[in-house]
Image (spheres, rainbow, N blue to C red):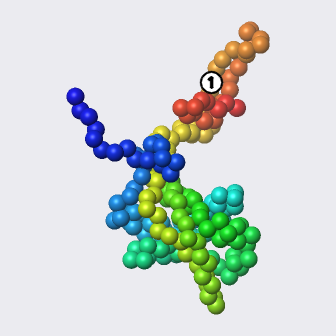
Amino acid sequence: MFQDTRPATLDASGGEDPFAAFAVSHPRELAALLRELRDGQHPVILNGPCGSAWTTTLWSVDEERGRLAFVANPADNEAPALQRLLDADEAVVVAYMDSVKLQFDTSQLTLVRGAQAGSLQAEMPRQVYRFQRRNSYRVRTAVTASQVPTARLRHPAIPDMQLALRVLDLSIGGCALW
């Protein structure tokens, strides 16, 4: 009989973290993911606990100091959503890279203003959750004049009436008909 003697991964409330399998916490892997996010200039959304959200990009990753910097244009400095994030001093960052969703918590938000540019600096996360967005993809039918996929069925209220409906979309969740 195998018994796992490793301690359970706990979430912030002290319970077991159901998303532990998706967590990346090794410093090298973490830095590589953040650099890829920065280099690809993928949009990131900073979500505050008060419901505010602000979209920007990751500007720099400072591994030595454990800091991230997000682009904050001078026009953004007066944005109400940015001000609410600064007041809250913490955010959940969400970004999408192709078919992968990244999500992590950050805190110690500081706005640094320059003459022509600015940045919103934050603490480097201790872990990043990496979720595959889809394991299976929808099937869309090819639209050609000669072969149109059709579903043939009886009308639910009038059994003698036959329906021929064009198939628009087919997925694990169902079928869209026209």
Say which of 11 and 140 sits in front: 11
Tell me if I can see residue 144 in this picture: no
Say which of 39 and 64 sits in front: 64
Q: Residue at 59% across / 62% down in the picture?
A: 91
The three-letter amino acid code for the residue at tag 1 is Ala
Q: Residue furthest front?
A: 14
- Pointer 1 residue: 151
Q: Residue furthest right?
A: 158
Query: Residue 177: x and y, percent?
Result: 67, 30
Q: Quadrant of residue 25?
A: bottom left
Query: Residue 51: x and y, percent?
Result: 69, 57
Say which of 69 and 153 sits in front: 69
Q: Residue at 27% across / 41% down in the picture?
A: 5
Work out whether 89 lies above or below 51.
below
Tell me if I can see residue 20 in this picture: yes
Query: Residue 75: x and y, percent?
Result: 71, 79
In this picture, residue 31 sits left or right of residue 59: left
Say which of 153 and 44 sits in front: 44
Q: Residue furthest top?
A: 160
Work out whether 103 lies above or below 152.
below
In this picture, residue 89 sits left or right of residue 35: right
Query: Residue 18: x and y, percent?
Result: 46, 42
Q: Residue furthest bottom?
A: 115
- The N terminus lies in quadrant: top left
Q: Residue at 58% across / 78% down in the picture?
A: 119
Q: Secondary structure at mark 1?
A: strand
Q: Quadrant of residue 36?
A: bottom left
Label 1 Cα neighbours within 10 Å, binned few <14 / some 14-19 / many ≥20: few
Number of dots carrying numbers:
1
